[in-house]
Image: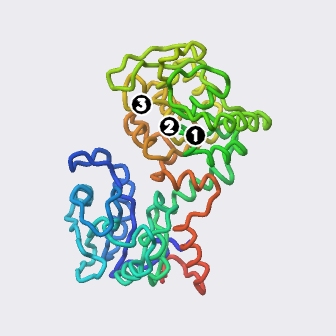
Amino acid sequence: MLTMSEVKLAGRRILIREDLNVPLEGGRITEDTRIRAALPTIERASAAGAKVMVMSHLGRPAEGKHDPALSLEPVAARLAELLGKPVRLIRDWPNGGFGVDNGEVVLLENVRFEIGEKKDDDSLARKMARLCDVYVNDAFATAHRAESSTHGVAKYAPTACAGPLLEAEINALRQVRDNPTRPLVAIVGGSKVSTKLEVLTSLVEVVDQLIVGGGIANTFMKAAGLPIGKSLCEDDLLDTARQLMQRSAARGASIPIPTDVVCAKEFSASAAATGKQATEVADDDLILDIGPVTAAAYVSLLKRACTIVWNGPLGVFEFDQFGNGTRALAEGIADSTAFSVAGGGDTLAAIAKYRVGGRISYISTGGGAFLEYLEGRTLPAVAILQERARAMPGRLHPSEGY
């Protein structure tokens, strides 16, 4: 891919697609990791004297309607605070008609307010392309989607390149997927096997240890003959879980099953937590976390790892009494000397809650894209940048620009 470092920026109109899809409560940003991750790219373009336009989606609004609850206004305010200068929010931007000064940063209103964005509408993509001299895709988290702002615009922009964040994401994940230093340990948590079946199927063929957590672990526990009470489980995937365990064992690896768990009688923030052996789960129990013995065993596996991939919590960590397993895992990864990559929305929240971000080698802002890349799928937003780069007659030295 052509990268932003190879492109002349000064005085040019730079349209940067970032992923600023942050959680909001009552119009207030509750977690700003994605904004902070995008900051270096935006600052670099602004410092170079570019006319910087940033676009992003937020939530899932109905196309063609301005939803105040999903406006990027709070994001513009936070971005201005972090940049230390004003950031204008531009509404009704696809047809142009607004100016941007050299070094200025403006934020374009939620791209999903625009009709055709999610369907990769060609007309909308061409309008986006006409706004800029250089299109920069820095939103790895959306790279698995072919949409106007991630894929279509890259076809028509005079120059299309990868931003530093997207470039770093690809490099980090490529190291894990294509050339990991072994042993390679993967942790995949979440509520359902079905949502992560393909990545589990892919990882089981390459990892040295696959740890499963959350509702996914319940399905594997039941497949192994253990009682899970009324815990979340996908009975139609029990055979699949057994097959994955068998395939893992055949390679000399394993998918460890929890030996102790933390249960409750109800799913609530005030529910009483009770530790039990995995063989003693009652019919009316909900398994909401792994127990301390299992957590210690998993941390021991992490100590021997040279490469670690983490996607998803091991329990309902949002409730403190059911977060000890996820906290132990997070701290175990942080304490490890392995090259570690973590990604996914819940994973980012856990990293923030347990304050281990500074000790994880690379934190991916991607969720679905993170998983699909590990599965070996083609990411449309990356593929179009590669296609544009292949079509270029020659690459100049980065200092020369284009």
Precedes in sequence: disc 1 or disc 3: 1
| Residue that appears at 52% across and 23% down | 290
Using the image, determine if residue 281 lies above or below residue 67.
above
Return the residue nearer the eye: 118 or 366: 118
Query: Which numbered disc, 1 or 3, marks the residue closer to the eye?
Result: 1
Query: Which numbered disc, 2 or 3, marks the residue closer to the eye?
Result: 2
Q: Are marks 1 and 3 in contact (CB under 8 Å)?
A: no
Residue at numbered disc 2? 191
Residue at numbered disc 3? 317
Q: Secondary structure at mark 1?
A: loop
| Residue that appears at 36% across and 82% down | 127
- Amino acid type, callout 1: Val
Does any portion of residue 30 appear in the rendered image?
Answer: yes
Q: Distance from label 1 to label 2 (Cα)?
A: 7 Å
Residue at numbered disc 1? 193
Specify whether 237 is left or right of 251.
left
| Residue 98: image location, x then y, percent | 23, 80
The circle drawn on residue 272 is: none
